[in-house]
Image: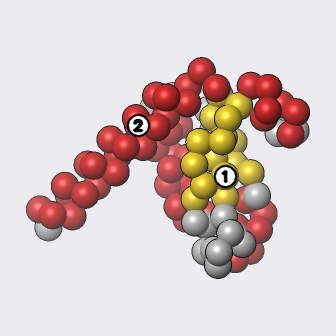
Amino acid sequence: MKRTEAEETFVKLVTASGMPEADLWKAVLEAAGITVHLRNEAMGSLLGVTSDTLGAVDLWVPRDDAARALEVLQDERIESGEDEEEA
């Protein structure tokens, strides 16, 4: 994804702390039918986790899907929290 493409049609949704978190969020969003592009994933792959912003991975989604994508991630976060409380 070129920077100009991202600026015109995609917006940065969230920044994951590393590739494991980015992969999880990407899978959740794609399961909801939302296209996701990762940015800075090469550094995240090398490090696995971040120290400050080093290793962070940005998730970019189509501008028109951004609001729904945030809802999907919020719903997933709530469901995951409920599951942990029940265990």
Residue under numbered circle 1: 58
Q: Amino acid at mark 2?
A: Val
Of 17 and 26, nearer the camera is 17
Outermost residue, left side: 86
**CA separation in Å, label 1 and label 2:** 17 Å
Report crowding for label 1: few under 14, some 14 to 19, many 20 or more residues within 10 A (C-alpha): many
Whether residue 83 is visible, yes or no, is yes
Q: How is the image coloured?
A: secondary structure
| Residue 72 as seen in the image, left or right of residue 14 | left
Where residue 76 appears, x then y in whole percent? 35, 46
Identify the residue shown where x is 59% and y is 42%. 13
Rendered-image quadrant of the N terminus: top right
Question: Tag 1, which secondary structure?
Answer: strand
Identify the residue shown where x is 79% and y is 32%. 7
Q: Earlier in the sequence, mark 1 or mark 2?
A: 1
| Residue 49 as seen in the image, left or right of residue 69 | right
Rendered-image quadrant of the C terminus: bottom left
Residue under numbered circle 2: 72
Where residue 18 appears, x then y in whole percent? 61, 66
Question: Tag 2, which secondary structure?
Answer: helix
Q: Is residue 81 above or below residue 36?
A: below
